[in-house]
Amino acid sequence: ERLYDFYDSVKKVGIPEFEKAIETIQNWQKQIMNSFGYELHNGYIEGINNQTKVIKRNAFGFRRFDRFRKKILLHHQYKHIQGQMA
């Protein structure tokens, strides 16, 4: 109820930037509220993605994709069995 009161207050002020922010919050309201209700998040995966992007930026010298892939897998501690890579 207080959230909807806040929406109304922002609309009464009439600042376009705030109205756009409220519109975004309303579009994602269900997901935002669920993030407070559940302890699930994708932080671990986002961390892996970030580390992989750093490796990619630093690995511009790799000419073969298979070596680049092995470098990423090695960094993330995945076990590699020769001949089973796709």
Image (cartoon, rainbow, N blue to C red):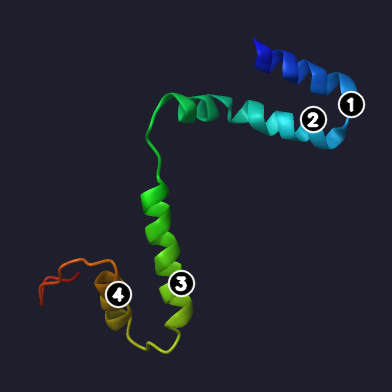
Q: Nearer the viewer, residue 11 or 47?
A: 47
Q: Earlier in the sequence, mark 3 or mark 2?
A: 2
Quadrant (top left/top right/bottom left/bottom right) for the C terminus: bottom left
Mark 3 to mark 2: distance in Å?
Answer: 36 Å
Residue drawn at 58 percent across, 30 percent down = 28
Asked if marks 1 and 2 touch (Cβ < 8 Å), the reply is: yes
Mark 1 to mark 3: distance in Å?
Answer: 42 Å
Residue drawn at 67 percent across, 33 percent down = 24
Give amino acid for label 3: Val
Residue 17 sits in which quadrant?
top right
In the rendered image, which residue does mark 1 sit on?
14
Q: Earlier in the sequence, mark 3 or mark 4?
A: 3
Give amino acid for label 2: Glu
In the rendered image, which residue does mark 2 sit on?
19
Mark 1 to mark 4: distance in Å?
Answer: 52 Å
Crowd class of label 2 (few under 14; some 14 to 19; many from 20; radius 10 Å)? some
Asked if marks 1 and 3 touch (Cβ < 8 Å), the reply is: no
Residue 54: which disc? 3
Is residue 84 shown above or below 61?
A: above
Quadrant (top left/top right/bottom left/bottom right) for the N terminus: top right
Residue drawn at 41 percent across, 75 percent down = 55
Q: Earlier in the sequence, mark 1 or mark 3?
A: 1
Give amino acid for label 4: Arg
Crowd class of label 4 (few under 14; some 14 to 19; many from 20; radius 10 Å)? some
Residue 69: which disc? 4
Left/right placement of residue 27 relative to residue 56 reads right
Mark 1 to mark 2: distance in Å?
Answer: 7 Å
